Amino acid sequence: MDIKLKPADYRSDIEPTWCPGCGHFGVIAALTKAFSELGLPPENIVSVSGIGCSSRAPLFMKNYSVHTLHGRAIPVAVGIKLANPELTVLVETGDGDMFSIGAGHNPHAARRNIDITVICMDNQIYGLTKNQISPTSREGLYGSLTPYGSIDPPLNPIATMLAYGSTFVAQTYAGNPKHMAYIFEEAIRHKGFSFVNVLSPCPTFNKVDTFKYYKNKTKDINEMGHDPADYEKALELAFHDLDHYYNPDAPVPIGIFYKGIKETYDERMRRVRERYTASGIPTVQELIDACKPKAI
Amino acid sequence: MARFDLTIKIGGEGGEGVISAGDFLTEAAARSGYEVVNFKSFPAEIKGGYAQSTVRISDEKLYSTGDAFDILCCFNGEAYFFNKKHLREGTVLVYDSSDFEPEEHKGVILYPVPLSELAKDVMKAYITKNVIALGVLCGLFDIPSQSIRDSIKARFVRKGEEVISLNYKALELGINYVRENLKKADPYKFPSPRQPKDVVIMEGNQAVAKGAIVAGCKFYAAYPITPATTVGNYIVEDLIKVGGWLYQAEDEIASLGMAIGASFAGVKSMTATSGPGLSLMTEFLSYAGMTETPVVIVDVQRTGPATGMPTKHEQGDLFHAVYGGHGEIPRAVLAPINVEESFYLTVEAFNLAEKYQIPVILLTDASLSLRAEAFPTPKIENIRIENRWIYRKEEDPEGRFKKAGRFLRFALFTEDGITPVGIPGDPEAIHAITGLEHQENSDPRNRPDIRTWQMEKRMNKLEKLLREDAERFYEFDMPYSKADVGVITWGLTGSVTKEAIERLRSKGIKINALYMKLLWPIRKDLIEGFVNSCERIAIPETNWSGQLAKILKAEVGIDAVSFCIYRGEPMIPKEVEDFIDYLINNPEMSAGRLTPSDIYGEKSYGII
């Protein structure tokens, strides 16, 4: 395709069902901008999601979309990618979908470096089920099942995904469209498993982690000199990712924590296949005939 | 009736080569042009525990490994202990006399051979014990030793000449031991070779793997689980050679999710599991039905519930396969009765999945998975392969499947409910799939009219399946216009029943039989036609509830007598025979449930 599509060309005619003021609007705006910048043909993009407010995102975009079950976007995305590695496969998910019910899938797609891009719209709350605390909710947050204020310490998405071996880990903020689009572009361009945590406020249920709260709090770690090739430094920075939960003056880091170069799973898969077919590809009949007992 | 019918059972400790000894005998029978069935079982432990391999050889088609053995070869005292109650007048016991001495058994022909001693002291290699035993069997029963040699060579070719010649020597040692020390006192003799047939030997799970390759499967995702894992073992290298891939998933939820993803990307895909895994897959089973995504799920049933007995047989997952899941979806459930059908029905599972865009469950079981059979070599040019209807713009000049620029993946205007799929990469068929109820262009909708129409679109696909693709999965054996008893069976119990029916008929009992290979959906008219040809209906199943009987009661409204065995072992032909005899002797019984205790007395678990 020679003519570059505009971001709007990647939008479907379905109007998003999100609440006014939801961070997720900005996410799909930035994502379609990234698609446009990268010149991706819509027919080669597959957006896979789970369940939750964030997981409706694929339906609002013009690309192949798979709206799966709660927590199950990553396995479906893996199946799609392995079946056709030529496709650009994205997972559009949320903090509950990815880090609670679907958390068991994260380490395996990450460590195997499956070449998919996972975008987690992290609003630190369950919105679609109307206000329950999520794995990334700060302590003390009120949810319908924790009317006393949450007593659970939050999970650190950045540190977790770094530890799992994700070869691209970044954080961005829904209030910064330019940074978001840049990070998405980098994440999609990255060969290998990429994880982007988007701080995407929920205006309806989370009255603490709001746009107002994040305003002037985010600090671009790359502008501050962090080299994404430095894994150990990335881990150190990641451990301070949730400092602002405990210290009102602490900055919220955004930017690329880590970007490493490692062979992708489908590249390894191809090498194994080449090894097996080096001396020719057998016919199916030959594979059946291999079960004959050899004659005396 | 067969002129020749010989059953050899080898028992010993897991890891002692019991299973490979049975495999070699199986190959010898096939090479000699005979029918052969081999049933193996081993313990859940990696090392140790009782393992056995039973090989039955005949000049006629075999349906099961029968009721009992003619020759028992015990590698240790434990194998003897487990089998001694089946020693009867005329049976042969070959045993390791360096390990144990048997009790007195009237009329049992004994051949003591110090197998362990010969292996340790003469061969200086204990691992050759099983091959020495094979030599003894060759010497005693005229089994063609050249065939055993061929099998040794094929098995050990990668281990080098030294290993091969060591095993050749062990074989000779066994043969010579017989010549020098034993005097033949039994009538059993391996038949002289006849023209070998063009056959393959496969195990149940291997047949599933080969069937999938023939069907065009290119993606297989699975999580390790006994007894389904070996489907993956058998398919992995074939799959890579034909350009596919096997992915070891993190759990069974992921396995089915991956298979669905691969199918969405246009690739035929499958997963195999056992009961506990099927439980985890059930949410995605529902999703596959809702999104009309073709996928094949193999459930190699094992004894449940919960972890149950992982290496043991049961037909306990039928309810789950047929009814399991939230909401209602179109699905098909197939179940082979033997290894050959495991091959062909796997191809059929893909065909149904592709044609109707539904999930298809293939139910096999732990015993069938380990059963080996020789059957005519499948010729792939004779095997019909179905592929899903893929949207092509040039085939849709009027743009019926496009509206306002959107692709109508779930269009409501096709008569049979089947609509073309769009494959990622095609700019003309961009669309979404969603587990939410949706309208023609995939957009989520809650409207009662759309809900009703989409539900009908999905579920009515089964009407077409029933019209076009059901009858061939009903195997009728109805020689009588009015039979005393009509037997309906499924799965491995079906092949056991075939043998029982031959015996009952030879006693003059009029029996019709129906072997159901398609357990869902159900052709009511075909069941009714069969039921009308019989005075009473008997349904033997290896589960507690009589699951098929209950399904047929619910769906067709027929009464039947269930015979339920749930000990973790398959039925044997004698038990089905006794069940039918019991019914003949109790003419008032036309519905209900029997267990072995009813037939054999208090607290019985059958006669195995």
Image: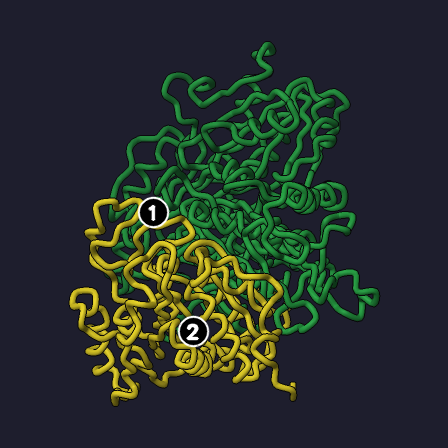
Chain colours: A yellow, B green
Q: Residue at x 56, y 21 (%)?
A: B561
The outermost residue toward the top is B588
Q: Quadrant of the N terminus of chain B?
A: top right
Q: Residue A208 is drawn in which quadrant? A: bottom left
Instruction: From the top left corner, tell me how far across and down residue A231 is, in percent.
Output: 25, 82
Depth check, front residue: A48 or B100: A48
A294 is higher (above) or lower (below) than B229 = below
Residue B19 at x, y = what percent? 41, 53
Q: Could you tell me the amino acid type at mark 1?
A: Pro
User: What is the distance, in whole Å, between disc 1 and disc 2 at their CAs?
Assistant: 37 Å
Residue B348: image tag: none
Q: Nearer the viewer, residue B382 or A162?
A: A162
> The disc numbered 2 marks a residue on which chain?
A
Q: Name the residue under label 1.
A: B43
> For this view, does B229 lie left or right of residue B472?
left
At 45% across and 38% down in the image, what residue appears? B314
Instruction: Return the residue at label 2.
Output: A114
Residue that extends furthest to the front in the rendered view of this protein = A212
The relative height of residue B89 versus residue B183 in the rendered view (above or below) is: above
Mark 1, secondary structure of its residue: loop
Query: Callout 2, which amino acid?
Result: Ile
Instruction: Tally the numbered discs.
Output: 2
* Front tag of 1 and 2: 2
Identify the image quadrant of the C terminus of chain B: top left
Residue B17 in which image quadrant = bottom left
Q: What element carries label 2?
A: loop
In percent of the image, x 45 and y 52: which residue is there? B228
Q: Is residue B359 in view?
A: no
